[in-house]
Image (cartoon, grey):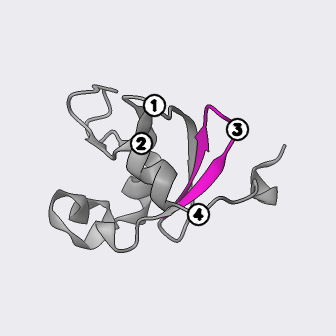
Amino acid sequence: MFHKVLQVVPTDDYKVYIYFEDGKIKLFDASELIKKGVFQQLQDIELFKNSCTVLNDTLAWDLSGNFDPYNCLDLDPEELYNSCPDVKEPIENII
């Protein structure tokens, strides 16, 4: 089964809540990722949060602002699903 990401919510401490199609919510900690290679540009917290989105059915950063699925930084949804801890929805995101 392919795990599809429906929504992502970035935080001020380089974490991202990832909402999967099956109802699970995972928490990805990007604090180590942003120290490596092309991801270093995401150390700017405003860029990290403002470009964080869903592209290619997974967590991605749309650095061009064009929502181009070929021109983004995205992560493997299966890896995210299998390696990130399950969490409950954060209270501050409930409206």
Magenta residues (range)? 15-27
Residue 48 relative to residue 70: left or right:
right
Is the Cβ of the residue at disc 2 closer than 8 Å to that at disc 1? yes
Is the Cβ of the residue at disc 4 closer than 8 Å to that at disc 2? no
Q: Is residue 26 magenta?
A: yes
Q: Is residue 71 magenta?
A: no
Amino acid tagged 4: Pro
Secondary structure, mark 2, is: helix
Amino acid tagged 2: Pro
Residue pointed to by mark 4 = 85
Residue found 48% across the figure and 30% down from its top:
1
Q: Position of residue 48 (x, y in %)?
A: 40, 56
Question: Mark 3 or 2 closer to N-term?
Answer: 3
The residue closer to the viewer here, 66 or 3, is 3
Q: Position of residue 57 (x, y in %)?
A: 43, 30
Amino acid tagged 1: Phe
Residue pointed to by mark 2 = 77
Badge 4 crowding class, 10 Å Cα cut-off, few under 14, some 14 to 19, many 20 or more, is: few
Q: Position of residue 36 (x, y in %)?
A: 20, 69
Amino acid tagged 3: Gly
Badge 2 crowding class, 10 Å Cα cut-off, few under 14, some 14 to 19, many 20 or more, is: many
Figure quadrant of the C terminus = top right
